[in-house]
Amino acid sequence: MLEEQILKQLKDQHADIRKMSQNIDLLSRKLLEHDVKLNNLVERDEFADFKNEVLKGQDKIITSIKRFDEERISAVALLKIFEDSLEIQRQKIQEHDDTIQQAKAELNIT
């Protein structure tokens, strides 16, 4: 009877030890999973840094494009002023040619 009690206690202890071993295995796996997740968080930080660098580069590009667009608008306005001035000069030249032709006609010069 005493031997049976001892055997039963040993079996119970063995079952308890087996459960503890399984719990330790589970905890070890969870620890490894958390370690991987932590490494992924570091990678996310690195990704965030990379993303910020890309966004800064895009901001610089957008700033340059805006400046080029402003310069284009200024160039178009300046070109319009030159074209208007050129047209005025052409009209004056035409007026002078007409005046010269009238003077030649009056003086009978060909």
Image (cartoon, rainbow, N blue to C red):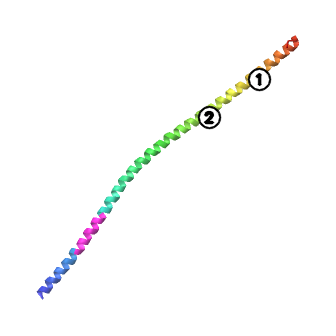
Residue appearing at x 35%, y 59% in the figure: 37
Question: Which quarter of the image is occupied by the C terminus?
Answer: top right
Q: Nearer the viewer, residue 107 or 73?
A: 107
Can you name the residue that lies furthest to the front here? 110
Q: Is residue 90 left or right of residue 102?
A: left
Amino acid residing under circle 2: Ile
Q: Which mark, residue 54?
A: none
Q: Which residues are magenta?
A: 18-30
Residue appearing at x 33%, y 57% in the figure: 38
Q: Which mark, residue 91?
A: 1
Residue appearing at x 20%, y 80% in the figure: 12
The kind of secondary structure element at disc 1 is: helix
Q: Which residue is mark 2?
A: 73
Magenta-colored stretch includes residue 98: no
> In terms of sequence position, does the residue under pointer 1 or pointer 2 come before the other?
2
The answer to whether residue 33 is above or below residue 19 is above
Amino acid residing under circle 1: Gln
Can you name the residue that lies furthest to the left here? 2
The answer to whether residue 97 is above or below residue 21 is above
